[in-house]
């Protein structure tokens, strides 16, 4: 469930979230060289943090998760004392580290980095700043992805309350809709529809996007009840502006990639390497997928067809395109990994046990730092304006 849930939760954003860049990332080593040069000349903390973020994104896109983690951890060690003057950049280091740790299989680090990201902003900007509440939602998303559903729901509820109390109904609606999607993931269809209705009421009648998201919830409930035409009917009714990341209407669960319970394979499984695949695909004007293909794969072997099948079966909200445009091109990174732990009989930490699939849109990889810093900068500006008034 982790892969599809993350894909979908990642799209539930408040209307204040800036549009993401659409450039396809070209893997190279320019950012790493720039970071080395920056450190050699003892550049200012703001420049060093930016260079570290760019280098880590470059390493992650290249499949060098360990290098990306070390780059971020070293940058945090050097710069966390500057959180007071650089709350956004330092917070971004933790946020990016959380993403890398998720894909690397270190769930303890994933949880800790996500929490430290939130605590950095809360300590510098306050509990009800726009930036803090936005990252609180991201923390709850991470907890939902780890199966801590009650903690995630409680955090969404808290943000919903704080946002409504400070007049940020758009953010309150985003938090409430996340509760709807979480309820849907837990099989609580009535709660999902109830929260989706509440989110639309909070957003107000002028928010067409939230109304569309509610329709998606209703469609998924209808599909569960056996209505095979529900997705086609919704796709025919709505279209999405191309100024925002594509909204996923439907994605089948990723087939369980683990051996049957009790088999020898799963008892002795040790996933010491990083297994990943980059899948490129077109979202056609009707929201269907075309030309899904493996662009790169690293030790994924027999799981590659399973992942391709999942991508090909997706349905997106049909994008609004200019006449003659073929669609939108995307690249997704699928990481297949176990969870870091120390098996019996050894003191060496390694990935072991059942494997899970984790997905990130590489087309938006730069957004791991860029969009985060934009949100924080906006929140910091708002906080400073409030202090002077």
Image (cartoon, grey):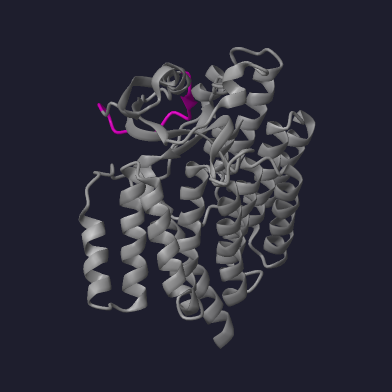
Look at the picture and state if 319 lies above or below 33.
above
Tell me, yes or no, whether the highlighted magenta stretch contains residue 148: no
Which is nearer the eye, 356 or 4?
356
Query: Image point 55% across, 58% down: which residue?
Result: 113
Residue 355 visible? The answer is yes
Look at the picture and state if 330 lies above or below 256.
below
Question: Which of the image's four quarters has the N terminus?
Answer: top right
Q: Position of residue 133 (x, y in %)?
A: 62, 62
Query: Image point 58% across, 64% down: which residue?
Result: 116
Q: Position of residue 260 (x, y in %)?
A: 63, 15
Tell me, yes or no, whether the highlighted magenta stretch contains residue 323: yes
Query: Image point 74% across, 59% down: which residue?
Result: 161
Residue 374 visible? The answer is no
Give the magenta range.
Answer: 313-324
Which is nearer the eye, 8 or 209?
8
Look at the picture and state if 352 lies above or below 312.
below
Residue 339, picture quadrant: top right
Which is nearer the eye, 288 or 209?
288
Q: Position of residue 145 (x, y in %)?
A: 61, 41
Residue found farthest to the front: 345
Question: Which of the image's four quarters has the C terminus?
Answer: bottom right
């Amino acid at each position: 469930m982790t892969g599809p849930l993350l894909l979908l939760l990642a799209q539930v954003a408040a209307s204040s979230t800036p549009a993401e860049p659409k450039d396809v990332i070209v893997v190279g080593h320019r950012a790493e060289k720039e970071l080395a040069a920056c450190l050699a000349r003892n550049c200012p903390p703001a420049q060093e943090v930016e260079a570290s973020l760019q280098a880590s994104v470059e390493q992650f896109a290249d499949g060098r998760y360990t290098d990306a983690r070390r780059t971020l951890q070293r940058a945090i060690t050097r710069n966390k004392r500057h959180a007071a003057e650089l709350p956004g950049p330092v917070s971004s280091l933790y946020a990016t580290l959380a993403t890398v740790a998720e894909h690397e299989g270190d769930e303890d680090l994933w949880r800790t980095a996500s929490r430290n990201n939130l605590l950095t902003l809360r300590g510098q900007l306050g509990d009800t700043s726009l930036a803090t509440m936005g990252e609180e939602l991201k923390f709850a998303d991470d907890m939902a992805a780890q199966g801590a559903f009650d903690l995630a729901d409680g955090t969404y509820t808290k943000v919903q309350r704080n946002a409504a109390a400070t007049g940020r109904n758009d953010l309150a609606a985003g938090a409430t809709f996340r509760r709807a999607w979480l309820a849907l993931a837990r099989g609580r269809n009535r709660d999902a529809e109830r929260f989706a209705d509440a989110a639309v009421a909070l957003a107000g009648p002028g928010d067409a996007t939230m109304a569309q998201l509610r329709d998606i919830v209703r469609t998924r409930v209808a599909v569960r009840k056996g209505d095979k035409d529900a997705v086609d009917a919704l796709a025919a009714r709505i279209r999405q502006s191309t100024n925002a990341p594509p909204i996923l209407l439907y994605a089948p669960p990723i087939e369980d990639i683990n051996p049957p319970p009790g088999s020898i394979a799963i008892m002795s499984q040790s996933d010491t390497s990083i297994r990943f695949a980059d899948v490129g695909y077109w979202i056609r004007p009707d929201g269907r997928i075309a030309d899904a293909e493996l662009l790169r794969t690293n030790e994924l072997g027999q799981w590659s067809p399973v992942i391709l099948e999942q991508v090909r079966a997706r349905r997106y909200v049909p994008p609004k395109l200019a006449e003659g445009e073929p669609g939108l091109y995307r690249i997704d990174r699928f990481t297949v990994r176990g969870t870091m732990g120390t098996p019996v009989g050894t003191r060496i930490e390694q990935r072991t046990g059942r494997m899970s699939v984790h997905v990130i849109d590489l087309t938006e990889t730069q957004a791991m730092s860029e969009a985060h810093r934009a949100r924080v900068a906006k929140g910091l500006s708002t906080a400073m304006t409030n202090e002077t008034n």
